Image (cartoon, helix red, strand yellow):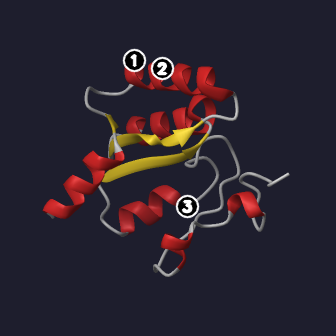
Amino acid sequence: GTGLGKAGSKGAALVPELEKRALQFVEKKHFSSFVDCDLESKLKALGVDEVYIAGINTDFCIFLTALDSFARGRFKTYVVVDAVSSLNGENGHIDGLRRLQSHLPPKSLVTTAQVVSRLSCE
Protein backbone atom coordinates (compact mmCIF):
# COMPACT_ATOMS: atom_id res chain seq x y z
CA GLY A 1 0.00 0.00 0.00
CA THR A 2 0.89 3.65 -0.11
CA GLY A 3 0.80 4.08 3.68
CA LEU A 4 -1.53 7.06 3.56
CA GLY A 5 -0.57 9.50 6.25
CA LYS A 6 2.31 7.43 7.64
CA ALA A 7 5.46 9.55 7.92
CA GLY A 8 8.05 8.64 5.32
CA SER A 9 5.59 6.67 3.17
CA LYS A 10 4.77 7.32 -0.48
CA GLY A 11 1.20 8.20 0.55
CA ALA A 12 2.43 10.95 2.88
CA ALA A 13 4.86 12.49 0.38
CA LEU A 14 4.41 16.14 -0.57
CA VAL A 15 3.18 16.98 -4.02
CA PRO A 16 6.03 18.41 -6.14
CA GLU A 17 4.56 21.93 -6.04
CA LEU A 18 5.08 22.06 -2.26
CA GLU A 19 8.52 20.43 -2.05
CA LYS A 20 10.45 23.67 -2.66
CA ARG A 21 8.47 25.84 -0.24
CA ALA A 22 9.60 26.75 3.26
CA LEU A 23 7.09 24.72 5.26
CA GLN A 24 6.69 23.93 8.94
CA PHE A 25 5.34 20.55 9.96
CA VAL A 26 3.48 19.33 13.03
CA GLU A 27 3.40 15.64 13.84
CA LYS A 28 -0.22 14.49 13.83
CA LYS A 29 -0.93 11.80 16.42
CA HIS A 30 -4.74 11.64 16.50
CA PHE A 31 -7.76 12.18 14.27
CA SER A 32 -7.67 15.90 15.10
CA SER A 33 -4.51 17.79 14.17
CA PHE A 34 -4.90 19.87 17.34
CA VAL A 35 -4.68 16.99 19.86
CA ASP A 36 -1.36 16.31 21.65
CA CYS A 37 0.77 18.59 19.48
CA ASP A 38 1.92 22.19 19.23
CA LEU A 39 -0.15 23.21 16.19
CA GLU A 40 -2.18 25.85 18.01
CA SER A 41 0.87 27.48 19.60
CA LYS A 42 2.69 27.54 16.24
CA LEU A 43 -0.30 29.14 14.53
CA LYS A 44 -0.63 31.75 17.29
CA ALA A 45 3.11 32.53 17.17
CA LEU A 46 2.81 33.14 13.43
CA GLY A 47 -0.22 35.40 13.90
CA VAL A 48 -2.49 33.07 11.94
CA ASP A 49 -6.19 33.80 12.32
CA GLU A 50 -7.54 31.77 9.37
CA VAL A 51 -7.13 28.01 9.00
CA TYR A 52 -7.77 26.29 5.65
CA ILE A 53 -8.04 22.52 5.95
CA ALA A 54 -7.21 20.02 3.21
CA GLY A 55 -6.35 16.33 3.42
CA ILE A 56 -7.81 12.89 3.81
CA ASN A 57 -10.76 11.49 5.69
CA THR A 58 -13.42 14.17 5.44
CA ASP A 59 -15.64 12.14 7.78
CA PHE A 60 -13.08 11.75 10.60
CA CYS A 61 -9.76 13.63 10.54
CA ILE A 62 -10.94 16.65 8.57
CA PHE A 63 -14.20 16.84 10.55
CA LEU A 64 -12.49 16.67 13.95
CA THR A 65 -9.65 19.04 13.01
CA ALA A 66 -12.16 21.60 11.70
CA LEU A 67 -14.31 21.37 14.82
CA ASP A 68 -11.28 21.70 17.10
CA SER A 69 -10.01 24.69 15.12
CA PHE A 70 -13.38 26.43 15.27
CA ALA A 71 -14.04 25.53 18.93
CA ARG A 72 -10.84 27.24 20.05
CA GLY A 73 -12.46 30.56 19.13
CA ARG A 74 -9.22 31.94 17.72
CA PHE A 75 -9.40 30.84 14.10
CA LYS A 76 -11.75 31.41 11.21
CA THR A 77 -11.93 27.84 9.98
CA TYR A 78 -12.45 26.77 6.39
CA VAL A 79 -12.58 23.33 4.79
CA VAL A 80 -11.49 23.25 1.15
CA VAL A 81 -14.12 20.86 -0.22
CA ASP A 82 -12.29 19.92 -3.42
CA ALA A 83 -9.04 19.32 -1.50
CA VAL A 84 -10.43 16.73 0.93
CA SER A 85 -11.56 13.16 0.43
CA SER A 86 -12.37 10.03 2.39
CA LEU A 87 -10.97 6.53 2.53
CA ASN A 88 -14.62 5.56 3.01
CA GLY A 89 -15.44 6.61 -0.55
CA GLU A 90 -17.83 9.21 -1.86
CA ASN A 91 -20.47 8.41 0.79
CA GLY A 92 -17.99 9.06 3.62
CA HIS A 93 -16.86 12.27 1.94
CA ILE A 94 -20.42 13.56 1.44
CA ASP A 95 -21.38 12.57 4.99
CA GLY A 96 -18.37 14.46 6.36
CA LEU A 97 -19.22 17.57 4.34
CA ARG A 98 -22.83 17.48 5.55
CA ARG A 99 -21.73 17.21 9.17
CA LEU A 100 -19.20 20.01 8.71
CA GLN A 101 -21.86 22.23 7.15
CA SER A 102 -24.16 21.68 10.11
CA HIS A 103 -21.47 22.37 12.76
CA LEU A 104 -19.43 25.21 11.26
CA PRO A 105 -20.53 28.78 10.52
CA PRO A 106 -22.01 29.60 7.10
CA LYS A 107 -19.45 29.96 4.28
CA SER A 108 -16.91 27.72 6.07
CA LEU A 109 -16.87 25.25 3.18
CA VAL A 110 -14.88 26.74 0.31
CA THR A 111 -13.37 25.62 -2.98
CA THR A 112 -9.76 25.77 -4.11
CA ALA A 113 -10.74 28.51 -6.58
CA GLN A 114 -12.16 30.61 -3.72
CA VAL A 115 -8.96 30.16 -1.69
CA VAL A 116 -6.76 31.12 -4.65
CA SER A 117 -8.94 34.18 -5.26
CA ARG A 118 -8.66 35.25 -1.60
CA LEU A 119 -4.90 34.77 -1.57
CA SER A 120 -4.38 36.69 -4.80
CA CYS A 121 -6.26 39.67 -3.33
CA GLU A 122 -3.82 39.94 -0.41
- Identity of the amino acid at label 1? Ser
As drawn, 117 above or below 80: below
Secondary structure, mark 2, is helix
Image quarter of the C terminus:
bottom left
How many labels, in total?
3
106 relative to 101 in the view: left or right: left
Q: Secondary structure at mark 3?
A: loop
Q: Which mark, residue 38?
A: 3
3 or 2: tag closer to the N-terminus = 3
Image coordinates of residue 62 in percent, x first then y, are 54, 38
- Residues packed near mark 1 inside 10 Å, few (<14), some (14 to 19) or many (20 plus): few
Mark in the foreground, 3 or 2: 2
Q: Is residue 119 shown left or right of residue 79?
A: left
**Amino acid of disc 3:** Asp
Mark 2 — residue?
99
Neighbor class of circle 2 (other Cα within 10 Å; few <14, some 14-19, many 20+) is few
Residue 4 in picture, x, y percent from top left: 74, 51
For marks 3 and 1, give the CA distance: 28 Å
